[in-house]
Image: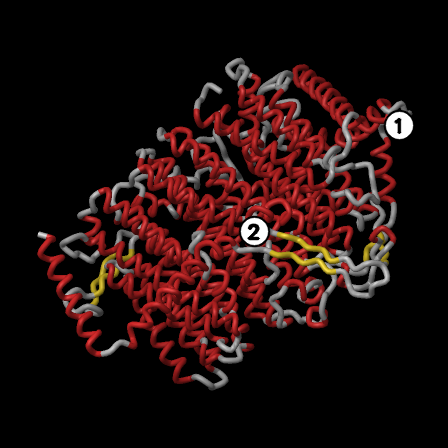
Amino acid sequence: MIRDLLSQSVQMLLVLFLAPLFVGFVRKVKARLLRRQGPPLIQPYRDLLRLIRKEVVLADSASWLFRVIPYLVFAATWVAAALVPTFRTDLMFSWSADLIAIIALLGSARFFLALAGLDVGTSFGGIGSSREVMIASLAEPAMIMIVFTLALIAGSTQLSTVAEFMASPQVGLRVSLGLALVGLVMVAIAENGRIPIDNPATHLELTMVHEAMVLEYSGRHLALIELSAALKLILYVSLLACLFVPWGLEAAGATLTALGLGVAAYVGKLAAGGFLLALFETSIAKMRVFRVPEFLGVALMLGLLATLLRFVSGSF
Amino acid sequence: MTLTIALAGIAVLLALAALAVLLAGTPKAGRVVYGGCTIVTAISLFAAASHLLGAAPPASLTLPLGVPWLGSHFRLDALSAFFLVVVDLGALCASIFALGYGEHETAPQRVLPFYCAFLAGMSVVVLADDAFTFLTGWEFMSLTSWALVMAHHRVPDNVRAGYVYLIMASFGTLTLLLGFGLLAGPTGHYTFDAMRAAPPAASLGALALVLALIGAGSKAGIVPLHVWLPLAHPAAPSHVSALMSGVMTKVAVYGFIRIALELAGPPDWWWSIVILAAGGLTAVMGVLYALMQHDLKRLLAYHTVENIGIIFIGLGLALAFKAHDQLFAAALAFTAALFHVLNHSLFKSLLFFGAGAVLTATGERDMEHLGGLIHRMPQTAFMFLVGCAAISALPPLNGFASEWLTFQAILLSPQLPSWGLKILVPAVGGLLALSAALAAACFVKAYGVTFLGRPRTPAAANATETDRFSLGAMTVLATLCLVAGILPGLFIDALAPVNIALIGARMPAQIGAQWLSIVPIAASRSSYDGFLVFLFIAMSGGLAAIAIHRFASDRLRRAPAWDCGYPDPSPATQYSAMSFAQPIRRVFGTTVFRARETVVMPPPGDTRPARLTVELRDLIWDFIYAPLAAGIGLAADRLNRLQFLTIRQFLSFVFAALVILLLVLALWS
């Protein structure tokens, strides 16, 4: 009991403390690929510290909701991130929310963030919110279809059970899994606002989505929002890792050394994921906002096709 | 006993309607009538809930009313008790809300009598146990609600709404009448007991089901029979809108369940295809229509269409599983549908009450004239936010719990052997996910444009908080939304008697599951714990707040909005409802609504303003209803000539008709 609780807490703190580092790592690799020096790895932590020490400049027309939303967004994202297996499956509370609920928790965070974009009553906030919900309205069904595929393969929507099943030899190579992988990567890129959907590095560009939504935030509120964005990124990488490269995930009752190995494997997977993300982002240009539906439509179709295959026959 | 209480409640409601006519015009009439309705519905709610929770056996009663040799049969079984709970809960909250809201009514004598009669009509429908009583109650409910829609009859839009509603309601009753005729069979047994005892042949049962889908579906708002709903629901006073959207559509769902799952006999597998397709289409079309609206109440009415689609998806799955004898899966799907019935009645009433409070405070339904109400009406804004989050299926609120159950039912359906369902169900799952995501987008728009931002008109800037009765009703509903979201197990267990009665199986008891979680099939397969999710969010949010207040700077300065350095003081520069929906309109609207945007940009030096015109077409109206109306008009014009014939021509027509009839009779045998 105590051990399980401890393990769950370690997982929660691990994602919380690794999230900024991961963002820093991706930035560093991107900079190196562009033959720049790049900021140090720990720059995101410094940014967060600097932000929480600064005063908050609150717009005159901001309401109480605007001040509550950063906490809500952070809480929902953190809970979701804590439920995705990182170094071990069978976490203590993994049964309290299955994969569908995790997606819905991220949906809650987005719902409130989009409201924050509208709260001050500026045109930039509005443009960000309206584009964010447009992207989400396609990314979420695509994600649900991918979840359907995985759930039908593993016979469960519990993420721990699915991850254990994926690590077992019975899973094999399947067409539907391949489709789901491609779809999930596309959804992850869109949900995190990475290139080619959105550019996390720019401000003051008319194509921006996430950054436009949070434009009015400052100080500690902005720190929470940035931390939530980092948590969401690491959540999706952990999700991809535990579903498609489940090796190194420790099951229940593993020894301390095995858990240590699990953490090492997780960090290794994060590094590989971060490198691939940076490589992908540097080799592609951002697309126009109204090309995004086509991109996500492909993800939705892949998910639907994979689910259909699973419905039609269990062997795909 | 419970049945007697419920029937006595109906009698008291009818007496209150008569009293309301007598009291019309006196200043205390509203308080007396709504207070009376509150007490009656509270007693009836308590009785129905205790019947359902106690899993009491069905009770029947025959009253010497109606057709002389038949009498009126009433029966309270688990299904009736559940729907009576939905009706009475909605009616109770609406009556409390109206204690405050009704004070602003300009023509109370046009609302009060019909309001009580409307409540009575809905209760009669769910308690009726023969076709005559059912249809009488149904028609009574339709006509009284029509009168309520026409309460403000000087508004031209309301007159049109009432006209379309009246036509669609009579059409719906007609198909139900034919359906009951088929179910009664050649012997003409109009009691439901007789129909249950002798189910019709499979083909007749299927026909009755289709007729019920059209009849009850048109009342519930199934696409393409929904056209009256977004016109009529917003036209009524807001507490009546809440009842029509939250409760009356559920009475229609009740009628459909009664016929489809009980009276029409054992289901065929293809029935579910029709229902699933209708449900999926309804869910997505409803929300897409809603996204294009900027009238707050009409937007809410279109969301009713969407949620009815979600309920019918659950019912279709239940029928599919039942037809293939997979009773546990059927119980899961049916529970999901019924739970969504309850949830939708809760949050839709809450949202309509919020819209009513906004309407009283500002006199506006158009979101483009609102904004910034969270500063002026903070409590209403908070309650409305709970409703928005619940209807957008966000955990840990109740909308998510029932949609999650529906998803779990969909994930069981690869076990179904028929190929049509194997292809259709994943597509319906996709449509359900799409409608949930679009609903969240729509409620960001509804809440953001109405309550957030800066006020767009002086009316919005000078709004005041609504009265305490309205707030009380909204608080009750918001609390129930949260309770049903974090303790769904209690509600699922309460639905077990309904499942046993209609499906023949029930979901596993949830009450013993650890930490109040819900486990539909097995713990290794799926579980969800709204209570823990709520606790975790509260804890991590609290933890973040403590950490921030301990370590971070707590300085705060108010300043003008930043807006990248170009803030504009005019509230017209904010995003409006139409501009918020523009990206989605561009993605979906070009095909679904043939949306066209034309931009008129005057040349430099010209002082005319630039203009953006958006043109949307309602294809369902244009391609189904408009040709139908034109055809009827044309036929009527042609037939009009028959009124101006000479007496000899009339006589020869009569003679010809007689000869033809005799010929037909002679040839028939």
Is A54 left or right of B274, judged from the image as shown? right
- Give the number of the disc on residue A38: 1
Q: Give the secondary structure at mark 1.
A: loop
Question: For the residues carrying marks 2 and 1, which lies nearer the camera in this image?
Answer: 2
Q: Position of residue B397 (x, y in %)?
A: 55, 48
In which quadrant is the N terminus of chain B drawn?
A: bottom left
Q: CA distance from mark 2 to mark 1?
A: 49 Å
Residue A116 in picture, x, y percent from top left? 72, 51
Q: Amino acid at mark 1?
A: Gly
B613 or B468, which lies in front? B613
The x, y position of residue B342, in whole percent, is 45, 53
Q: What residue type is disc 2 on?
A: Phe
User: Dot 2 corresponds to which residue?
Assistant: B593
Q: Would you place residue B181 above or below residue B324 in this image?
A: below
**Chain on which label 2 sits:** B
Residue occupying the far right of the picture: A37
- Check disc 2: other Cα within 10 Å, few if <14, some if 14-19, many if 20+: some
**Residue drawn at (43%, 26%) of the image:** A312
A146 or B472: nearer the viewer = A146
Identified at 32% across, 69% down, the residue is B639
Provide residue B309's location: percent of width, then percent of height: 46, 48
Occupied quadrant, residue B410: top left
